Image (cartoon, rainbow, N blue to C red):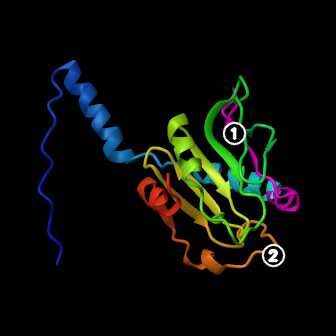
């Protein structure tokens, strides 16, 4: 049996401030919270990292850069920068790009390293830059680094991106769907 909700309390709108408050509340209530990323953005990041993943694995090097919007509002990516085995200097964003996220690959598979999860440094870098991030792993996972929530979340699991042929789940079998900043600190140390 469903119960009827009581009528909402009216918002006073007799004053300009009351009308603005009513308009803002209507937008917030109707629209809800904005998503951390859009489906368009996820598809763009996934396509970009799919193209970089094979080169990253073959060369056993990270590649990194920025995702942003151009002057027309379209999604664009900066030219990938080639990093080292376990790091990548992202540099400065292109001058006319409105940055919305960073991106980088995690090079080739190494059973001795935790490279199926974004690193503590990956997340703290995004938090400090106040931008989100996308990370691909040798097992073919795609992660989203949410700077505001201070956590990383899997967008898709093993094999959703090109996978290193020598990848073996091993420790990666226990990879969770998300990790908070504190959980990464405990897992990877300071």
Q: Using the rendered image of the protein, determine whether residue 37 is visible from the camera's viewpoint.
A: no
- Which is nearer the eye, 170 or 190? 190
**Residue located at (71% from left, 67% from top):** 140
Q: Nearer the viewer, mark 1 or mark 2?
A: 2
Q: Using the rendered image of the protein, determine whether residue 80 is visible from the camera's viewpoint.
A: yes
Whether 3 is among the magenta residues is no
**Pointer 1 local density, CA inside 10 Å: few below 14, some 14–19, many at least 20:** many
Q: Which mark is residue 166?
A: 2
Looking at the rendered structure, the number of numbered marks drawn on it comes to 2
Residue 9 is left or right of residue 65, and the answer is: left
Farthest residue to the top: give it. 16
Q: Magenta stretch? A: 53-74
Measured in 3D between alpha carbons, the distance from the residue under mark 1 to the one under mark 2, in whole angstroms, is: 28 Å
- Which is nearer the eye, 184 or 176? 184
Q: Which mark is residue 82?
A: none
The image quarter containing residue 81 is: top right
Residue 174 is left or right of residue 7, and the answer is: right
Instruction: Estimate the x, y position of residue 65 in percent, counting from the top left.
Output: 72, 41
- Which is nearer the eye, 45 or 7? 45
Image quarter in which the N terminus is found: bottom left
Q: Which mark is residue 66?
A: 1
Instruction: Estimate the x, y position of residue 75 in percent, counting from the top left.
Output: 70, 40
- Secondary structure type for disc 1: strand
């Amino acid at each position: 049996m469903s119960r009827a909700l009581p009528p909402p309390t009216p918002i006073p709108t007799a004053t300009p401030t009351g009308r603005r408050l009513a308009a803002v509340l209507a937008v917030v209530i109707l629209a809800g919270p904005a998503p951390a990323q859009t489906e368009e953005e996820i598809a763009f990041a996934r396509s970009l990292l799919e193209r970089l993943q094979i080169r990253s694995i073959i060369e056993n090097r990270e590649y990194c850069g920025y995702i942003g919007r151009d002057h027309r509002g379209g999604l664009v990516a900066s030219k990938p920068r080639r990093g080292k085995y376990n790091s990548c200097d992202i540099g400065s964003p292109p001058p006319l790009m409105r940055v919305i996220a960073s991106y980088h690959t995690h090079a080739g598979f190494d059973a001795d390293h935790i490279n199926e999860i974004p690193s503590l440094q990956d997340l703290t870098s995004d938090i400090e830059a106040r931008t989100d991030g996308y990370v691909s792993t040798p097992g073919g996972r795609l992660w989203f680094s949410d700077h505001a929530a201070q956590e990383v979340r899997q967008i898709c699991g093993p094999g959703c991106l090109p996978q290193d042929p020598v990848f073996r789940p091993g420790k990666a079998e226990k990879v969770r769907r998300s990790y908070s900043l504190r959980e990464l600190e405990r897992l990877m140390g300071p």
